Amino acid sequence: MTDEGYLVAVKPSARRVSARAGRWVNSEGPTRLFDSKPLAREWARACSSAGATVWVQDAPAWAAGDADGYLVGRRFRDAGAERSGQQATITDR
């Protein structure tokens, strides 16, 4: 985290699954500065939906300089009650 706050770079995965994140990039650019990491996480939760999750991931130490963290996302193919939350094993395939 910099002295100015917590700088988040919005990655393509977040833009693909979150219209809100995509609108931010289109109007303001690919980064967003927050006063703190918890505020960045709050925005990520607001960008999430039932079928897609968006979260803040810390940038690795070797990539320091361009951002403190990344907004990334993932869409779920089968969003709903049928998702068991269990990890599949190789024998399940």
Image (cartoon, rainbow, N blue to C red):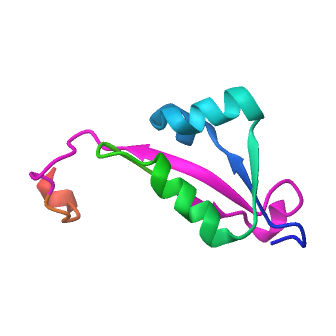
Say left or right for 81 vs 62.
Answer: left
Say left or right for 10 vs 63.
Answer: left
Find residue 33 and report its horizontal and vertical position in percent: 77, 55
Q: Residue furthest left?
A: 82
Find residue 84 and report its horizontal and vertical position in percent: 13, 61
Say left or right for 62 vs 22.
Answer: right
Q: Which residues are magenta?
A: 55-83
Q: Could you tell me which residue is drawn at 56 percent across and 55 percent down?
A: 43
Depth check, front residue: 62 or 15: 15
Determine which quarter of the picture holds residue 79: top left
Q: Could you tell me which residue is drawn at 54 percent across and 42 percent down?
A: 14
Find residue 68 and report its horizontal and vertical position in percent: 77, 63
Q: Could you tell me which residue is drawn at 77 percent across and 34 percent down?
A: 29
Determine which quarter of the picture holds residue 77: top left
Depth check, front residue: 72 or 45: 45
Residue 59 covered by magenta stretch: yes
Determine which quarter of the picture holds residue 28: top right
Residue 24 covered by magenta stretch: no
Q: Residue furthest top?
A: 26
Name the quarter where the N terminus is drawn.
Answer: bottom right
Q: Could you tell me which residue is drawn at 48 percent across and 37 percent down?
A: 18
How many marks the image carries: the answer is 0
Where 47 sits versus 1, above or below?
A: above
